[in-house]
Image: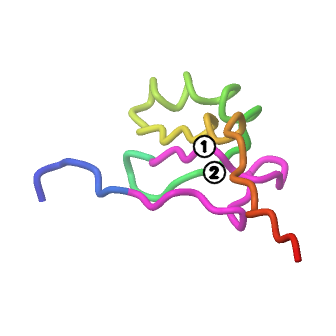
Amino acid sequence: MTGALAPTKPLSVADRCDRCGAQAYVRAVLVGGGDLLFCAHHGRKYAEALRANGADIQDETDRLTETPATAPNDER
């Protein structure tokens, strides 16, 4: 192992914030192993302190502003 962090999979709708239970958009991968999941609000609140302690932050909050794809118009 080179010391690089293993890639993490994208967060899904089933991933929940460890603080409040809302959908998680931020993953903090801890130096000692393991990770913490946060909603956008709690991710912003704790990211700086986690980074200062060496955590790698996976931030997917940009997904909150994505426009969902629309279904094709099914006219019969």
Instruction: Give above or below for 30 relative to 14.
Output: above
User: Which segment did they paint magenta?
Assistant: 8-29
Q: Position of residue 54 (x, y in %)?
A: 39, 33
The answer to whether mark 1 and mark 2 are in CB contact below 8 A is yes
| Dot 2 alpha-carbon crowd within 10 angstroms: few under 14, some 14 to 19, many 20 or more | many
Q: Position of residue 18 (x, y in %)?
A: 73, 53
User: The C terminus appears in which quarter of the rendering?
Assistant: bottom right
SS type, badge 1 = strand
The secondary structure that dominates the magenta segment is: loop
Q: Amino acid at mark 1?
A: Val
Q: Between marks 1 and 2, how big is the CA–CA gap?
A: 6 Å
The quarter of the picture where residue 41 lies is top right
- In reply to whether residue 42 is colored magenta, the answer given is no
- In reply to whether residue 19 is colored magenta, the answer given is yes
Residue beneath disc 1: 26
Q: Position of residue 60 (x, y in %)?
A: 57, 41
Q: Amino acid at mark 2?
A: Leu
Name the residue at 55% across, 22% down: 48
Name the residue at 80% across, 63% down: 73
Relative to 47, is 5 on the left or the right?
A: left
Residue beneath disc 2: 37
